[in-house]
Amino acid sequence: MQETVDVVVIGGGQAGLAAGYHLRRAGLDFVVLDGQDSPGGAWQHTWDSLHLFSPAAYSSLPGRLMPPQPGETYPDAAHVVGYLTDYEQRYDLPVHRPVRVEAVHRDGPFLRVEADAGTWRARAVISATGTWARPFVPAVAGRTEFRGAQLHTVEYQRPADFAGQKVIVVGGGNSGAQIAADLAHGSDLTWVTLREPRYLADDIDGRALFDAATARRRALDEGRADTGGVASLGDIVAVPPVRAVRDAGLLKAQPMFTRLTPTGVAWADGMTAEADAIIWCTGFRPALAHLAPLGLRGPQGHIPTAGTQALGEPRLHLLGYGDWTGPASATLIGVGRPARDAARAIADLLR
Ligand code: FAD
């Protein structure tokens, strides 16, 4: 099967849907190809207790406010999945799933998108494949020696799976703090962070992160000094469950260890800790393998962009991967603006 369209959007999570919304408004002919069996992107695979760090109204895609979740200021992941499911139906977005894109090639005036379910020829491509598919674990000495379980954030589900066990949680971001808080009561927890945990003030939440990212974008757009963006505020949103465990004195962070041993971890000063399991909450990398044939990779594995547009291939836009593809673009509320900019740029290019 081979189909020709104006635009192929690769990935049907929140970024792909926001792109679809704006492509529709721009009057372009497009398809969204998503590797999942059902709607919701990465939100289908988070741990049970995960709640957003912003209220529903501040977690909305373009065109439609996320409705509040009854009884919850901060909606849970299932609520987000429901919202995204409704969003793609409401706007009748042409999402094909499960369709896994394997490679994108230049093909004369087209980009050829090769997937397990067929081939599409597109005049432009928006890649919106997120980061969840590429968990990152740092290279730490002894990783293969440790005889216990090692898992990444993406594999963690619930504290009951570790009841009574000695667990080491690695990572000082939101995932590390939330999973450590989840485990603090039922497990023998050691929380390890690269540097002293930096909490945002208790009275601010994800809204402040979005405001900081927006202020930074404005400052840079207007040629003013860099305000530092979200990094200037802290690393951890003190959501209620994290705050409760921290205030109970159960979230004391240890510095990063230097190696794994067969039974746990060891620090440079000779201190050791035993562990049944180590949970690596050490982040993600952008899932860009399907773009390898275009030969666009720059330093740090990123593809150099101006806004969302790839510098080496103007028909390709990258959406939702992080601040490098638009300020706060890896959040629900932040992806709308770069999605609009990408759709407009493509409409101009194809005109
Ligand atoms: P994804 O949701 O990962 O969607 C990408 C889609 O593309 C997936 O369906 C995937 O299967 C598909 N795909 C990947 N590769 C291919 C391929 N080759 N072919 C076809 N399909 C493919 N944001 C907020 O706004 N508020 C929060 O409170 C918040 N909390 C977060 C908590 C955690 C623990 C994490 C990890 C993130 C959080 N985020 C939050 C950030 C962000 O909203 C999510 O990471 C979001 O899921 C990113 O959306 P996306 O559409 O870019 O990627």
Image (tube, rainbow, N blue to C red):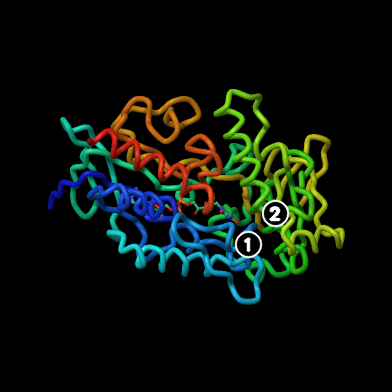
Give the numbered dot on residue 150: none
Contact, CB < 8 Å: mark 1 with mark 2?
Answer: yes
Q: Which residue is mark 2?
A: 205
Q: Secondary structure at mark 2?
A: loop
In percent of width and height, residue 194 lies at 72, 39
Kindly tell me whether mark 1's CB lies below 8 Å from ligand 1.
no
Is residue 166 visible in this depiction of the protein?
A: no
User: For the point 80% across and 63% down, which residue is it?
Assistant: 244
Does 227 sit left or right of 66 as displayed? right
In percent of width and height, residue 271 lies at 82, 43
User: For the point 82% across and 38% down, which residue is it?
Assistant: 270
Does 28 sit left or right of 165 as displayed? left
Picture layout, residue 165 above or below residue 267: below
User: Furthest-bottom residue in view?
Assistant: 70
Question: Of the residues shown, which amino acid type is indicated by label 1?
Answer: Pro
Q: Secondary structure at mark 1?
A: loop
Count of numbered labels shown in the rendering = 2
Task: Say which of 53 and 203 sits in front.
Answer: 203
In percent of width and height, residue 118 lies at 18, 52
Position of the C terminus, as image quadrant, is top left
Disc with the residue nearer the chain's start (1 vs 2)? 1
Does 91 sit left or right of 226 as displayed? left
User: Furthest-left residue in view?
Assistant: 1
User: For the point 42% across and 30% down, which residue is it?
Assistant: 303
Distance, label 1 to label 2, CA atoms, is 9 Å
User: For the point 47% across and 66% down, which residue is it?
Assistant: 83
Task: Say which of 129 and 84 sits in front.
Answer: 84
Q: Which residue is mark 1?
A: 55
Picture layout, residue 12 above or below residue 217: below
Give the crowd class for mark 2: few <14, some 14-19, many >=20 residues within 10 Å: some
Task: Say which of 138 and 203 sits in front.
Answer: 203
